[in-house]
Image (cartoon, rainbow, N blue to C red):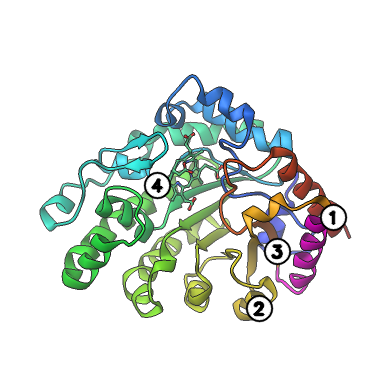
């Protein structure tokens, strides 16, 4: 059993710096494309055997130090009663949006073992196969809310901010509902065998710190509080979150995920005695070997005073990344950090 990742999460000394990559199971791997060729994305998410297969791919092919459950943050929104579709080339779509009290009140609090039993089954099956730790996950309530309010991905988040600023009570009700469902969902993942849990806040960075503190952070804090009983590391990743770093530290997470826009050494000085995860620019994987090596060496050096460092990308791996380059990065991190 390789528990290097879990040790780094707890701030313990490790023989080398562990690495995994956000969205490490996915379209950049021909092996994933092959599985995905026969089913839709949602069918894939609901087939435990196939989820196990694609979760294991980056571990076997790229030698990652942690596995992340194959699923999607929006699966829970569907379980709450929202209609979820994935459109080729456009990403997630919610044809029915949640913008007023009447609509929000229709969302249900699902029993995670019933409504998302396929996720829990995937976790149980994976634990029988894996020799590295398994990370479970959910979206942060703010990020999930943007999808329900906008009806999919957005660039300006007009409807989200309109609701926040003109009908804050409705907005808070939606956040409470997602938070309650997320607590049960992550607790069920921990019971099924997840050894760490990551909360993805992909859109937190669109908020001013004062609004993040009121409309997003308290719900992340609530979720993390309700997970303390399981005694497993919690990772909070606020994308584009450099300006929210001090607030993110107060989330209560054990590990702070960093996007690439901040120098990791500066971030480490600000987070104090907490582990950090990150943070090479996903596109830097395209660098020629010597330059990639130099950049990884510099990042490892900048992170040398961390109270635990898990190497990762600053956001998900891009679908057109050559797998050989991802493999090169994994090998370089292992080689350059060996102590
Ligand atoms: C915002 C968000 C979503 N999903 C997720 C986030 C947070 C992380 C982030 O900011 O990227 C999280 C996610 N989505 C997926 C995983 C699997 C585990 C992993 O390997 O990290 C995880 C952890 C699979 C996926 N989720 C999706 C795919 C591609 C689906 C396909 O095979 O066509 C995968 C492998 C689809 C998805 N799902 C989502 C979007 C916006 C899209 C479309 C964009 C895209 O195509 O990359 C919602």
Q: Which residue was labeled with disc 1?
A: 290
Q: Dots 1 and 2: beta carbons under 8 Å?
A: no
Classify mark 4: helix, strand or loop. Answer: helix
Relative to 19, 84 lies left or right: left
Q: Which residue was labeled with disc 4?
A: 185
Q: Which residue was labeled with disc 2?
A: 266
Q: Residue at x 47, y 70 (%)?
A: 251
User: Of label 1 and label 3, which has the lower sequence position?
Assistant: 1
Residue 301 falls inside the magenta stretch = yes
User: Of label 3 and label 4, which has the lower sequence position?
Assistant: 4
Cα–Cα span, label 1 and label 4: 43 Å
Q: Which residues are magenta?
A: 291-307
Q: Quadrant of residue 7?
A: bottom right
Residue 16 visible in the picture: no
Cα–Cα span, label 4 and label 2: 34 Å
Chief SS of the magenta region? helix
Q: Residues within 10 Å of mark 1 (few under 14, many from 20)?
A: few
Residue 93 falls inside the magenta stretch = no
Classify mark 2: helix, strand or loop. Answer: helix
Check the image and report above or below for 292 versus 162: above
**Residue 133: percent from the left, percent from the top?**
65, 45
Q: For the residue with label 2, is its CB less than 8 Å from the closest atom of ligand 1?
A: no
Q: Nearer the viewer, mark 1 or mark 2?
A: 1
Kindly give the residue lying farthest to the right in the view shown: 339
Cα–Cα span, label 1 and label 3: 23 Å
């Amino acid at each position: 059993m390789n528990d290097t990742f879990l040790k780094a999460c707890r701030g313990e000394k490790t023989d080398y710096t562990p690495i995994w990559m956000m969205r490490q199971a996915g379209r950049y791997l021909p092996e994933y494309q092959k599985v995905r060729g026969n089913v839709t994305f949602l069918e894939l998410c609901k087939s435990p055997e196939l989820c196990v297969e694609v979760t294991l791919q980056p571990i076997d092919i790229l030698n990652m130090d942690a596995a992340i459950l194959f699923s999607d943050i929006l699966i829970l929104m569907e379980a709450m009663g929202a209609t979820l579709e994935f459109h080729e080339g456009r990403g997630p779509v919610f044809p029915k949006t949640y913008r007023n009290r009447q609509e929000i009140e229709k969302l249900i609090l699902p029993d995670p073992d019933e409504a998302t039993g396929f996720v829990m089954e995937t976790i149980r099956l994976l634990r029988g196969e894996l020799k590295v730790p398994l990370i479970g996950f959910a979206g942060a309530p703010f990020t999930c809310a943007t999808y329900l309010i906008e009806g999919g991905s957005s660039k300006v988040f007009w409807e989200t901010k309109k609701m926040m600023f003109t009908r804050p009570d409705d907005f808070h009700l939606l956040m409470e509902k997602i938070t309650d469902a997320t607590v049960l969902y992550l607790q069920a993942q921990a019971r099924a065998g997840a050894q760490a849990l990551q909360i993805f806040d992909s859109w937190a960075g669109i908020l001013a710190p004062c609004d993040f503190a009121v409309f997003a952070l308290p719900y992340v804090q609530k979720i993390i509080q309700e997970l303390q009983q399981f005694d497993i590391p919690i990772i909070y990743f606020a994308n584009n979150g450099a300006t929210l770093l001090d607030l993110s530290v107060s989330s209560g997470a054990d590990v702070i995920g960093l996007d690439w826009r901040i120098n990791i050494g500066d971030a480490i000085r600000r987070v104090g005695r907490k582990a950090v995860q990150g943070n090479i620019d996903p596109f830097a994987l395209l660098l020629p070997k010597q330059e990639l090596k130099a950049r990884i060496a510099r990042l490892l050096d900048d992170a040398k005073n961390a109270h635990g460092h898990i190497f990762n990308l600053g956001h998900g791996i891009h679908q057109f990344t050559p797998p050989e380059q991802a493999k090169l990065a994994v090998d370089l991190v292992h080689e350059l950090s060996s102590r």
